[in-house]
């Protein structure tokens, strides 16, 4: 395995080089990328408008926010040009899942691909911060770095190593699309790395163990998983696909859903949100990365991805031509969920 | 006249005795680990207590101001409606092991909930029946800035009793009258000696110098007030995703919503108060459909101004205790220290740059 630090430096250099070019040649008005945060384990999304700010852009294994979130309609008014109605041209630092989000959002008619240039990078994975924090417990982390194939966590009087592959986000461990997918309709939009996805072999072995559990056990898992949710909606707000003007859970005239932090209300929110993401979620894992109480929604996301793949043979964000399975009805759709299970 | 020495000592192995014998009339809440997060929950024994914690994830305000609180329940029987009011107001509580920053938040919350004509009985009665036993913060985090907002890792004037972790034992200092009364009633505590006091002072000094952030907040209230329309707010809110993490983990945020839930099928219902935050658009949405804080710029600004401008103007207090939770857990690292610093450093020329519309 190539040294992670080297990989990150190369990716950083490439991001800066392409960004400089895009800004200098006025191909874009704005670059959205990642920058160093203000303390270890943090990462700050940045909006770069001038060439001399390009040095702020970095890549490391903590760049967990799905930057496409900044493009969806909830937020776009902040980046639209003030007086003219014309959209800004945006350069977006895009790992595989961010590019997939752009593809999916374009299919959902939320963004215009003509406005967007993807600064494609071959993502080498995002560290599971919450898991590292749990392992370190009530000790202050003063530095986190990667070296070789390890994560090195330093504190005032300790230094611990964690194998990188094991401490990745669960969705990164099973990710098959690391860089922007090569689609004919997207070729004009990509600078930098891209990936041939014509030979994509998806498998869902990672959730087999969960699927083999009894319904009671699975219910127990969901209950237990969501216990500490504070309904801060960080998962929803960071999600590029949660762009509804008014979320179902915020409907209050009349009220559609319970608003308390009691477990039935919490579960209603998360499971219905999950259903709304069917055929759309690209598995970027941002929701799990940002959760302040460390709830990992990966399993739910994966299960939905699997159902959509099995029933509709659709992979979100890997296809710019198929009509979205949840936006259409076909008599031949695999709808066996509507029937009683046999035997 | 020699003043009676008040400081006591309790050995760590005697904590169970303290809970079982001396504090048995109280419901005691302390920092424990639950699903990987430190939270304040009811404790009977010292077994699970995590007193060497950095700070809790969920602030201890939740003990007397929980995220979901039933105000009353009702049941319809024939022609009668039977009300059942919240009955845990009189419960005698102890919050054990609260950090000085969080203890100070209780003072701020009390100020808010008792301000003006309408006192919040529910909160204030619970507060009155709650004894705070604080513990000095030996190892502040790199996101801590209590010393910049009139606090200190060993500030003890917001608690009733103050503890200092001296490795194998705790130094116990009664602060308030009821703290003194409680300590005097525990006959088996030993007196502290000079070395204990000396060590405590050393720890306090070390903790203070461990805090790296030193914010200049001189005239910050005026500065923010004068720059209400500054274009900097656009830059600051650009990265914000609009979630409620900062508010829900904040020990001083106190906004709430009141909702009625009716169970038609069973002829009963309840009125519940839940946490709310100015970061959500729904918070300010009028029935008419108008929203005075319809943009994220306005909502981001409100949170900062409430703590550093309106609180000083209304109560002569800073509405922030410097615990650093909003910094630590913000999904996009929108660091409040950086925001305040940017306003403090605005040049005259930059002060002229205003938001468009």
Image: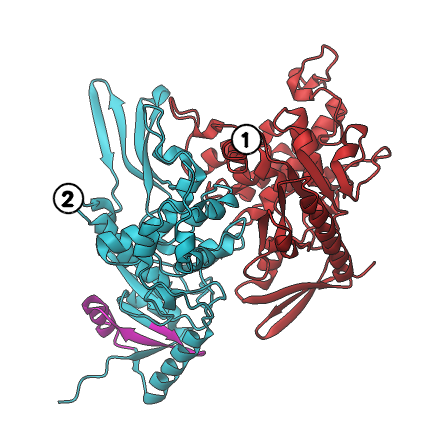
**Dot 2: within a 10 Å radius of its alpha carbon, few (fewer than 14), some, or many (20 or more) residues?**
few
Where is residue B1, by image quadrant?
bottom left
Q: Of A114 and B28, which appears nearest the observer?
A: A114
> Does the magenta segment cover residue B237?
no
The residue wearing badge 1 is A73
Q: Is residue B281 toward the left or the right of residue B3 in the image? A: right
User: Residue B159 at x, y = what percent?
Assistant: 28, 65
Q: Is residue B180 magenta?
A: yes
Which dot, 2 or 1, sits closer to the camera? 1
Colour assigned to chain A in the rendering is red
Q: Mark 1, chain letter?
A: A
Quick check: B294 left or right of A186?
left
Can residue B141 be seen by looking at this rendering? yes
Q: Position of residue A226 (x, y in %)?
A: 53, 42
**Residue lying farthest left?**
B1
Q: Residue furthest top?
A: A331
Q: Which chain is cyan?
A: B
Q: Nearer the viewer, residue B193 or A293?
A: A293
Task: Please give the residue where the numbered disc 2 appears in the rendered image.
Answer: B117
Q: Position of residue A140 (x, y in %)?
A: 54, 67
Give the magenta-colored segment's residue range.
Answer: B163-188
Sort mark 1 into few (<14), some (14-19) or many (20+) by Cα contacts within 10 Å.
some
Q: Which of the colour schemes (rainbow, by chain, secondary structure, one colour) is used?
A: by chain
Residue at the extreme right of the image, as rendered: A199
Q: Secondary structure at mark 2?
A: loop
Looking at the figure, which quarter contains the C terminus of chain B?
top left
Looking at the image, residue B75 lies above or below residue B356: above
- Chain letter belonging to callout 2: B
């Amino acid at each position: 395995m190539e040294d992670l630090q080297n990989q990150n430096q190369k990716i950083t250099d490439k991001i800066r080089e392409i960004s400089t070019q895009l800004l200098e040649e006025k191909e874009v008005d704005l670059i959205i990328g990642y920058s160093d945060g203000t303390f270890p384990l943090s990462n700050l999304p940045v909006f770069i408008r001038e060439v001399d700010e390009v040095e702020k852009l970095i890549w490391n294994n903590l760049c967990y926010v799905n930057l496409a979130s900044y493009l969806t309609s909830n937020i776009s008014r902040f980046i639209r040009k003030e007086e003219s109605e014309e959209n800004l041209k945006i350069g977006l630092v895009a790992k595989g899942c961010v590019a997939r989000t752009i593809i999916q959002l374009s299919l959902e008619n939320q963004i215009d691909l003509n406005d967007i240039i993807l600064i494609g990078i071959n993502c080498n994975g995002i560290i599971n911060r919450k898991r590292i924090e749990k392992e370190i417990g009530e000790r202050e982390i003063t530095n986190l770095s990667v070296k070789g194939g390890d994560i090195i966590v330093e504190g005032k009087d300790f230094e611990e190593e964690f194998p990188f592959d094991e401490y990745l986000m669960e969705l990164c461990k099973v990710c098959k699309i690391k860089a922007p997918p090569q689609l004919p309709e997207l070729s004009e939009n990509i600078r930098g790395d891209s990936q041939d996805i014509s030979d994509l072999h998806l498998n869902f072995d990672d959730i087999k163990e969960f699927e083999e559990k009894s319904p009671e056990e699975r219910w127990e898992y969901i209950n237990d998983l969501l216990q500490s949710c504070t309904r801060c909606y960080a998962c929803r707000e960071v999600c590029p696909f949660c762009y509804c003007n008014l979320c179902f859970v915020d409907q209050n005239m009349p009220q559609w859903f319970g608003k308390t932090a009691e477990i039935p209300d919490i579960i209603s929110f998360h499971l219905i949100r999950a259903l709304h993401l069917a055929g759309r979620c690209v598995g970027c894992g941002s929701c799990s990365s940002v959760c302040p109480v460390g709830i990992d929604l990966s399993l739910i996301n994966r299960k939905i991805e699997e159902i959509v793949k099995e029933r509709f043979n659709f992979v979100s964000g890997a296809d710019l031509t198929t009509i979205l399975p949840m936006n259409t009805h076909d008599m031949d759709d695999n709808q066996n969920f509507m029937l009683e299970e046999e035997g | 006249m020699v003043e009676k020495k008040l400081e006591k000592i309790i050995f760590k192995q005697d904590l169970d005795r303290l809970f079982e014998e001396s504090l048995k009339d109280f419901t005691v809440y302390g920092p424990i680990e639950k699903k990987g997060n430190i939270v304040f929950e009811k404790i009977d024994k010292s077994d699970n207590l995590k007193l060497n914690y950095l700070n809790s994830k969920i602030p201890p305000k939740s003990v007397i101001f929980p995220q979901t609180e039933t105000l009353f329940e009702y049941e319809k029987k024939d022609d009668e409606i039977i009300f059942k009011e919240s009955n845990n107001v009189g419960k005698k509580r102890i919050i054990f092991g609260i950090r000085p920053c969080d203890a100070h938040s209780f003072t701020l919350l009390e100020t808010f909930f008792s301000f003006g004509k309408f006192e919040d009985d529910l909160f204030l009665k619970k507060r009155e029946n709650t004894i705070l036993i604080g513990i000095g913060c030996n190892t502040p985090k790199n996101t801590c800035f209590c010393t910049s907002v009139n606090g200190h890792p060993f500030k003890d004037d917001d608690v009733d009793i103050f503890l200092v972790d001296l490795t194998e034992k705790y130094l116990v200092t009664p602060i308030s009258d009821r703290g003194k009364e409680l300590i005097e009633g525990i006959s088996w505590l030993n007196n502290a000696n000079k070395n204990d006091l000396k060590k405590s002072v050393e720890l306090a000094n070390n903790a203070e110098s461990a805090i790296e952030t030193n914010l200049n907040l001189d005239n910050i209230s005026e500065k923010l007030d004068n720059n209400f329309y500054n274009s900097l707010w656009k830059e600051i809110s650009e990265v914000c995703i609009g979630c409620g993490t900062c508010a829900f983990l904040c020990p001083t945020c106190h906004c709430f919503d009141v909702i009625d839930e009716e169970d038609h099928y069973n002829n009963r219902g309840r009125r519940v108060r839940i946490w709310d935050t100015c970061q959500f658009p729904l918070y300010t949405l009028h029935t008419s459909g108008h929203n005075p804080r319809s943009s994220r710029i306005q909502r981001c600004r409100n949170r900062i101004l409430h703590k550093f401008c309106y609180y000083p103007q209304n109560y002569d207090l800073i509405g922030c205790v410097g615990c650093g939770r909003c910094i630590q857990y913000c999904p996009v690292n929108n660091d409040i220290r950086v925001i305040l610093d940017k306003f403090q450093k605005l040049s005259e020329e930059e002060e002229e740059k205003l938001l468009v519309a």
